[in-house]
Image (cartoon, rainbow, N blue to C red):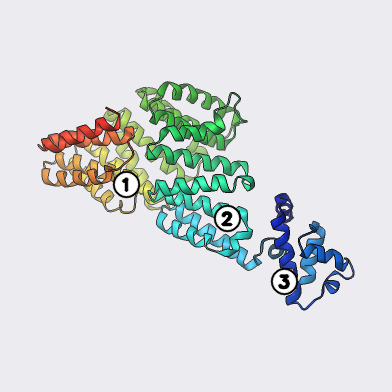
Amino acid sequence: MLLLKRYFSRGNVTGQDLVGQRIKAVRRQRGLSQAQLAHPELSDSYVSLIESGKRTPTAAVLDLLAEKLECSLTYLINGVTAEQMQEIEHMLSYARLALENGEVAEARARYLELLGDSGLAGLPQRRQDAQYGLALATEACGDLDGAIALLSELRQGAAAEMAPERHVSVAVALTRCYRVQGDSTRAVQVAEQILGGAVRPVWTEGLIELGTALLAAYAERGDLLRAHHFGAELLAAAELVGTPRATVLALWAEAIIAVETGRSDDAVALADKALAIYAENGDPRNVATLRVDYAQIRLITRPSEAGICRDMLARVEAELQESSANATTKLKCAHHLARAELLLGRPESAREHIQSVLSMIEGMPRGLQAEVHLLASETMAELGRNEEASRELTQVAQQLDGAPTTRQTAHAWLTAAQVLERIDEPARSVDAYQRALACVGL
């Protein structure tokens, strides 16, 4: 019945033509005339009109014709057999699982393979799923330009057939990609097209997530006052939505804004509350991921509590080894452990963790690779291994060259400059300082 509802909701002549053509093709394969197919329930002229695309069959007639032709209703409507549909569903599930587990290159390849399947032509919803999945996998592979192109094409080309929830999820991804790319203005524009009117739409979980993406874009372009006011509105909206996920999303976004505006106590309090709610309601794997991010906030806002963070991260690391957590989460956990050990004045222990991280960075986004090499350079400098620190900083420069001119990039260049100054490479240090200033328009 759901299949029939989707067919009649399309309301397009092309769909009618294709259904008629399939009925005609199967009828001929069965060696039946139009009169034989029609008898006794229908007239042969009615069957002729259906086959020529001049008449839209009712749900009951479609069901009857599928039975008389001894084929599946799925095939008449979508042009795929039940077996093909099962295979498509299986491939979609495999690609989604690969993406969730951090196997981003594999996910990208699987989605591309799916989109090359001619069977998807008659399955607009499944095609959208594959296009959206490909965009996310492309983003995860670090190809932001490619992801933006895919998301923009999906947003424009399939707008009429796209469910409201998918419209919002595409806007979330597009906002995020533009922000990470360094184009915070475009990021804000995408989100505000939906959320920026004088009258807000009825809030949903999806719109709360879009709101958090908008908050991050405000923060990235330095519009912290606006971010603070909108964050308060988002928290109130999350209370109206009333779901744990909506509340956690809003709390976490506001915690990040609190970090950016130097409100350390507020940041920790908001993060504490978000983690407590999610620990009761979230999937264990996602809870572990949130704990990793929580430890990062604590390390930034309360470096004196590095010991507490280290112990927490050590427990999370053990949990991640026994779970199907994705590679990015495992990498970030080891990275933050190294940072905690460095803050505790234990550079040798930090080096052990950073070596583990370095073994995992292949195929990761360039920004994340730069962060890892930067921490490695700090660790080597602390150990007095200046040559190794210098080599790590060369890797940092290679990853940051051509990177978006965001505040995060500026901070990375600033840290690199300080480490270069420490290991007595003044010329490279001056260049890194200049690059940091250029990132903030100075």
Image coords of residue 112 (percent x, y):
48, 59
Residue behind mark 3? 25
Image coords of residue 102 (percent x, y):
41, 52
Q: Is mark 3 on a helix, strand or loop?
A: helix
Compare residues 92 and 54 and report the one nearer the observer: 54
Closer to the chain start, of discs 1 and 3, is 3
Residue behind mark 2? 127
Closer to the chain start, of discs 2 and 3, is 3
> Quick check: 198 left or right of 63?
left
Using the image, determine if residue 264 lies above or below residue 28: above
Q: What residue type is labelled 3?
A: Ala
Residue behind mark 1? 366
Closer to the chain start, of discs 1 and 2, is 2
Image coords of residue 246 (percent x, y):
54, 34
Tell me which residue sits at (40%, 23%) in the image. 224
> Quick check: 168 left or right of 181?
right
- From mark 2 to mark 3, how far is it between C-alphas? 24 Å
Q: Which amino acid does label 2 sit on?
A: Arg
Compare residues 249 and 45 and report the one nearer the observer: 45
Q: Callout 1: 10 Å neighbours few (<14), some, many (20+)?
A: many
Q: Please tell me whether mark 2 or mark 3 is closer to you in this view.
A: 3
Q: Is mark 2 on a helix, strand or loop?
A: helix
Tell me which residue sits at (26%, 32%) in the image. 438
Are discs 2 and 3 less than 8 Å apart at CB? no
- From mark 1 to mark 3, how far is it between C-alphas? 52 Å
Q: Which amino acid does label 1 sit on?
A: Arg
> Quick check: 309 left or right of 203?
left
